[in-house]
Image (spheres, rainbow, N blue to C red):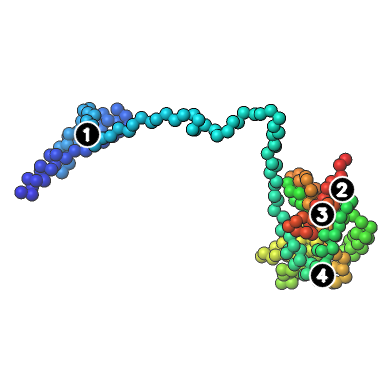
């Protein structure tokens, strides 16, 4: 009984195969027609009789959509311009710039504590206001932030004393060993100072990574990565008696170009501190 049932099922078995083109259909018929499957030859042909299915009572037709008057779907108010009305300009978008790491309060407090043993400088620079001339030492391209020296008679004297002392000590200052260089070390390193080349300047070790050190030049407001064996010892307190020469500023309106700007004098007015970082002063350049 079981073999007869199996034979009957095989006789009634069928399948469909869809191909991409008529040529592929002809090729499939040629290769597969008459092939043996489980001991029986199969017949392959094109299914041409595709009659449409007759509708049944279960099929329902969706009714036509009713037209909706324009008054119910149109705008609720008249958008045509009226006489004696004032058009308001869309508000201008205000671009917010991330404050560079070297300008942030926490970074500067750590530097001042390690190098100068006094953090009062950070609060004293925030008191500057009014007309000022600034010597730009470093800029953050395409942002308003920059480092500069506030040119005053007192600052000019401090610059002369500091740079003369550094020039005299550079040749005799010993290089630090790798073990002596640690995070927070105050020392001496070469700093790029524009077209004039390099100059030895006070710096603070921010991080030590293998044979390299990330240092912050306190008188230029600039970070750099230098070899550990290029750092010289500068730990005497008299070298750190003069507070940092450079301080952070932000242009009130403009932003700096993509190129770095160094050793350029800007004249204008200090208009007040930033709200988020009170020691960063906003500076308005004088109209030429």
Give the tally of numbered discs. Answer: 4
Q: Is 174 situated above or below 194?
A: below
Q: Disc 2 designates what residue? A: 268
Would residue 5 be found to the left or right of residue 92 on screen?
left
Mark 4 or 1, nearer chain start: 1
Identify the residue at horizontal 75%, vertical 67% (top origin).
110
Q: Disc 4 designates what residue? A: 118
Judge by depth and name the residue closer to the eye, 78 or 151.
78
Q: CA distance from mark 2 to mark 3?
A: 13 Å
- Label 2–label 1 contact, CB within 8 A: no
**Which element is circle 3 on?**
strand
Identify the residue at horizontal 83%, vertical 58% (top origin).
246
Q: Nearer the viewer, mark 3 or mark 1?
A: 1
**Which element is circle 4 on?**
loop
Question: Dot 4: within a 10 Å radius of its alpha carbon, few (fewer than 14), some, or many (20 or more) residues?
Answer: few
Q: CA distance from mark 4 to mark 2?
A: 30 Å
Q: Nearer the viewer, mark 2 or mark 1?
A: 1
Q: Quadrant of residue 88?
A: top right
Q: Nearer the viewer, mark 4 or mark 2?
A: 2
- Picture coordinates of residue 196 (x, y %)? 85, 51
Q: Is residue 227 visible?
A: no
- Picture coordinates of residue 146 (x, y %)? 78, 52
Q: CA distance from mark 3 to mark 1?
A: 83 Å
Q: Disc 1 designates what residue? A: 56
Would residue 231 be found to the left or right of residue 57 on screen?
right
Q: Disc 3 designates what residue? A: 272
């Amino acid at each position: 009984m079981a073999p007869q049932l199996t034979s009957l099922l095989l006789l009634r078995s069928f399948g469909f195969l869809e191909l991409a083109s008529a040529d592929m259909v002809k090729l499939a018929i040629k290769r597969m027609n008459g092939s043996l499957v489980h001991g029986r030859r199969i017949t392959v042909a094109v299914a041409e009789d595709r009659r449409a299915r007759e509708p049944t009572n279960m099929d329902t037709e969706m009714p036509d959509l009713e037209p909706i008057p324009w008054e119910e779907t149109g705008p609720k108010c008249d958008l045509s311009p009226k006489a004696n009305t004032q058009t308001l300009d869309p508000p201008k978008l205000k671009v917010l710039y991330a404050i560079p790491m070297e300008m942030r309060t926490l970074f500067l407090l750590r530097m001042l504590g390690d190098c100068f043993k006094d953090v009062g400088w950070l609060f004293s620079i925030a008191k500057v206001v009014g007309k000022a001339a600034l010597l730009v030492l470093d800029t953050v391209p395409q942002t308003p932030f920059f480092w500069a020296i506030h040119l005053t008679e007192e600052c000019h004297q401090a610059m002369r004393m500091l740079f003369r002392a550094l020039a005299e000590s550079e040749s005799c200052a010993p290089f630090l060993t790798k073990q002596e260089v640690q995070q927070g070390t105050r020392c001496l390193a070469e700093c790029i100072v524009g077209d004039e080349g390099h100059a030895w300047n006070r710096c603070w070790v921010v991080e030590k990574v293998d044979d390299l050190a990330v240092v912050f030049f306190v008188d230029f407001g600039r970070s750099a990565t230098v070899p550990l064996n290029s750092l010289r010892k500068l730990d005497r307190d008299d070298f750190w008696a003069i507070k940092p020469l450079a301080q952070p500023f932000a242009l009130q309106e403009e932003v700096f170009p993509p190129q770095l700007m160094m050793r350029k004098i800007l004249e204008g007015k200090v208009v007040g501190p930033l709200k988020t970082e009170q020691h960063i002063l906003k500076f308005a350049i004088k109209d030429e």
